[in-house]
Image (cartoon, helix red, strand yellow):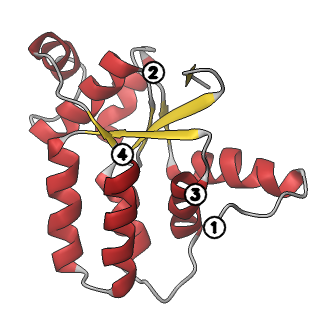
Amino acid sequence: MKRSRGNTRSFLLDNNVFVAAIAHPKRATGTLGLILHLIADPGVRLVGNVYLAEEMMRYTEVFPSETATLLIEALASKMEFIAVEGKYLKICGGYLGTSDQSDIAHAATCLSTGPTLISDDHHFDRIRDEGIIEVWSTKKAVDELLGAAREHGDKPCY
């Protein structure tokens, strides 16, 4: 697991993780628990970019709820927004099987600043497999972050 700033762990949550948490706000899903944990844990640094903020805002309107509103506010207040240099966009664009600028920007943000990308989007498989950036599925993130807390008898941060 990549670490930066001492013991702080850095992550970029892809929009599909956010959507999974807000699409059915009455369900207490592992994805919702994961996001709440990442927001509440002072040892976690969340990184994003303007594309991610725009995507999340758009889906807050598609799936309107108090949960979506509270999550977007909490994520935005904790997230460090990065402006990515063109060289990182070019490198990552060559590894992704998509021309989606937001996916390229997410990968480039991770390449330039080091966070682990949490996503279930298969566009990131090659860049992960090549070892360019670290990519975790939502299941792996839940298992690694929430599972470790449960194994140690820790109460969730949220």
Q: Secondary structure at mark 3?
A: helix
Q: Quadrant of residue 50?
A: top left
* Label whose residue precedes the other's in the sequence (4 or 1): 4
In front: mark 2 or mark 1? 1
Q: Quadrant of the C terminus?
A: bottom right
Label 2 and label 1: CA atoms lie apart by 33 Å
Q: Is residue 59 above or below residue 124?
A: below
Q: Residue at x 23, y 73 (%)?
A: 60
* Mark with earlier residue (4, 2): 4
Front tag of 2 and 3: 3
Give the mark, 3 or 1, whose residue is nearer the N terminus: 3
Expressed as whole percent of the image width and height from the top left, the position of residue 64 reads 24, 84
Circle 3 residue: 40
Mark 3–mark 4 distance (CA, rounded to whole Å): 12 Å
The amino acid beneath tag 4 is Met
Judging by the rendered image, the residue that carries numbered circle 4 is 79
Q: Give the side of residue 143 with respect to residue 25, left or right.
A: right
Q: Which quadrant of the figure has residue 142?
A: bottom right
